[in-house]
Image (cartoon, grey):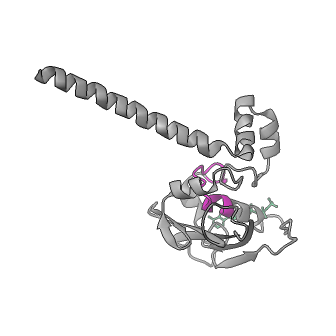
Amino acid sequence: MYLKKVEIRGFKSFADKIEVDFKEGITAIVGPNGSGKSNIADAIRWALGEQSIKTLRGSKMEDVIFSGTDNRKPLGYAEVNIIFDNKDEFIPIDYQEVAITRRVFRSGESEYYLNKNPCRLKDIKELFMDTGVGKDGYSIIGQGKVDEILSTKPEDRRIIFEEAAGIVKYKSKKEEAKKKLEKTQDNLIRLKDIIAELE
Ligand code: ATP
């Protein structure tokens, strides 16, 4: 599995649609200061579900939408489409190509698509869990991330190793099951109370 292509329209400095093909062997994006290199990394992270605007170097979610220039009007929405080659089926889905699309409007409305079908952020998160690719995955190391990893608390650092070991999915499922169990136990207590009242 590898990231094959990124398509960006209306995201940050990219008003017009751009396509970046990551052909085999490409390991870096170079360009003058302020030309949008980091915006491409932000776009990938955003499409994978990044919700923290601080991580995306803005102050409100609307900041990811092209805000206009002296001779160009601001746009109403931003869209990023990232395409993975999945011939090795590393991403657990029955498709040789996996396309994730995220779109956001100035109204704040947000949409996600998986291979052009509308989906929830939860679906994308689950799909990429334990692959190292998700928004918290270790495949995107932003500026300052290395320092952060080294200076972070051992418990936080452990999360990175857990993702690499492939156990995050099971931990998350365990948490979900625990919540369901708690809810069921609460319901049982309530039921017992009702039965006691009726007897
Ligand atoms: P450096 O090498 O200095 O880190 P870079 O190539 O990584 O630069 P970016 O940080 O990706 O550059 O791009 C910064 C540019 O993006 C700035 O000129 C900024 O004005 C522009 N920009 C960011 N958000 C928006 C937006 N919403 N609308 C229009 N332009 C934006």
Residue 29: quarter of image: bottom right
Q: Is residue 105 left or right of residue 135?
A: left
- Report the quarter where the C terminus lies: top left
- Quarter, ligand 1: bottom right
Residue 28: quarter of image: bottom right
Q: Position of residue 134 (x, y in %)?
A: 66, 54
Residue at image point 80% right, 33% down: 151
Residue at image point 44% right, 63% down: 107
Q: Is residue 134 magenta?
A: no
Q: Magenta residues: mostly which secondary structure?
A: loop
| Marker count (numbered) | 0
170 versus 29 height, above or below: above
Q: Which of these two is toward me, 173 or 11?
A: 173
Q: Is residue 47 magenta?
A: yes
- Report the quarter where the N terminus lies: bottom right
116 versus 121 height, above or below: below
Q: Which of these two is toward me, 96 or 64?
A: 96
Q: Position of residue 30 (x, y in %)?
A: 86, 68
**Residue 105 visible (yes or no):** no
Q: Position of residue 32 (x, y in %)?
A: 84, 68
Q: Which of these two is toward me, 140 or 108?
A: 140
Q: Position of residue 139 (x, y in %)?
A: 76, 54
Residue at image point 36% right, 33% down: 184
Residue at image point 54% right, 73% down: 75
Q: Which residues are magenta?
A: 43-58
**Residue 115 visible (yes or no):** yes
Q: Which of these two is toward me, 34 or 94?
A: 94
- Give the residue at the far left of this rendering: 198
Residue 140: quarter of image: bottom right
Q: Is residue 165 left or right of residue 46?
A: right
